[in-house]
Image: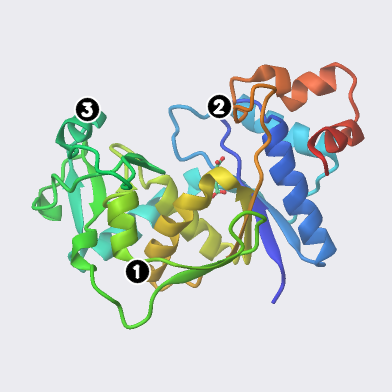
Amino acid sequence: MTFRTRFAPSPTGPLHLGHAYSAILGHDMARAAGGEFLLRIDDLDQSRCRPEWEELIFEDLRWLGLAWDGNVRRQSEHFEHYSQTIHNLAEQGAVYPCTCSRRDIEAAASAPQEGVPAFGPDGRIYPGTCRSRAYGDRQPTDALRYDLSKTVGPPPRMPAFTETGPTHAGRHEVTAEHLLTRVGDPILARPGMAASYHFAVILDDAQSGVTHVIRGEDLFEATFVQRFLQWELGLSPPIYHHHRLIRDDTGKRLAKRDDARAIRTYRAEGATPEDIRRKIGL
Ligand code: GLU
C-alpha cells in the first residue's frame, strides 16, 4: 500500500504556523515513507473562499519547500458527486431535512446533565427536533441530517478507526450512542451547500485513495462522525494521525485572523523556511 496523505486548507485567509505544522508534518511523513503528498483545496463554502487566498496557499507551500504530487483537487469541482451520494443514502431512509437555526437548537436542548457534554465538534448537540420530517419534503433552505436513532443498537461489527497521533494512539470504536450523546444527528449538507465538511472530506479522501489523514488535534472528535459516515457508505477508513496544535503566547489555538503568525508575515519579515520549522519544533 502506497502511503498517501493530503494537506487540505480552506482558502478563507492566510496560512499560519498551525497550517505550516500540518503541511510540513504530512509532507515529511509521506516523503519518509516513499509515499505521496497531495494538496486539496477545501472550498465548500463558496461565500467565504477567495481566489487570492488560494494563490497565497500555493505561494506559501512553495516557499516552505513543500512540493505536492499530482493535480490540486478542489471540493467545488465535486458538488454534484456529494449531492448524488447524499441522495442515494436518503433512499435508504435515514436522511431528513432540518430547519433548525442555531438558536432553535439552543432552545430545544435539554438542561445540562452532569458528565454529558453540551457541545460537540459541530456546536451544541442536536436533539433531533426535525427527525419526523420526510426527505421528500426538503426545501433548498434546509440542512440535511442523518438519523442516528435508526442505527442505535449493536451492529454486527462496530466501525472503528486507528489513530497514531501522540494523544489518542490506538483503536477507537464508533457507536451511534457515542455520536448521539457527543454530536447529535450529523449534518450531511448545510443549507445552500452541496455537503457538510464531514461528508465532503470522507468522499474526497476515498476518491483520492488517501491512506493517512494527518491533521490537528482539534479534529479528533470529528473523526468519530466521519468514520461513522464512511461505514454507512461502505468506505474503508484511512489511518488517522492528529497532531498537537500550535498555540499563541496566551495558549489559544491560532486562527486565520491571527495575521501576526501568518506565513506571509514571516516571509515579509525575512524569515527562512528553516526558521519556521524551528519555531514549530519540526
Ligand atoms: N479543511 C479542513 C481544515 O482546514 C481540513 C480537513 C481535514 O483535514 O479533514 O480544517
Does dot 2 land on a helix, a strand or a loop?
loop
Q: Look at label 3 and name its amino acid.
A: Arg
Whether ligand 1 has any atom under 8 Å from the Cβ at mark 3 is answered as: no
Identify the residue position indicated by label 1 in the image: 232
Residue 105 circle label = none
Question: From what the image shows, is residue 154 above or below residue 9?
Answer: below
Q: CA distance from mark 2 to mark 3?
A: 29 Å
Mark 1–mark 3 contact, CB under 8 Å?
no
| Quarter the N terminus occupies | bottom right
Mark 2–mark 3 contact, CB under 8 Å?
no
Q: Look at label 1 and name its amino acid.
A: Glu
Identify the residue position indicated by label 3 in the image: 103
Within 10 Å of disc 3 (Cα), the crowding (few <14, some 14-19, many 20+) is few
Identify the residue position indicated by label 2 in the image: 50
Within 10 Å of disc 1 (Cα), the crowding (few <14, some 14-19, many 20+) is few
Report the mark closest to the observer, 2 or 3.
3
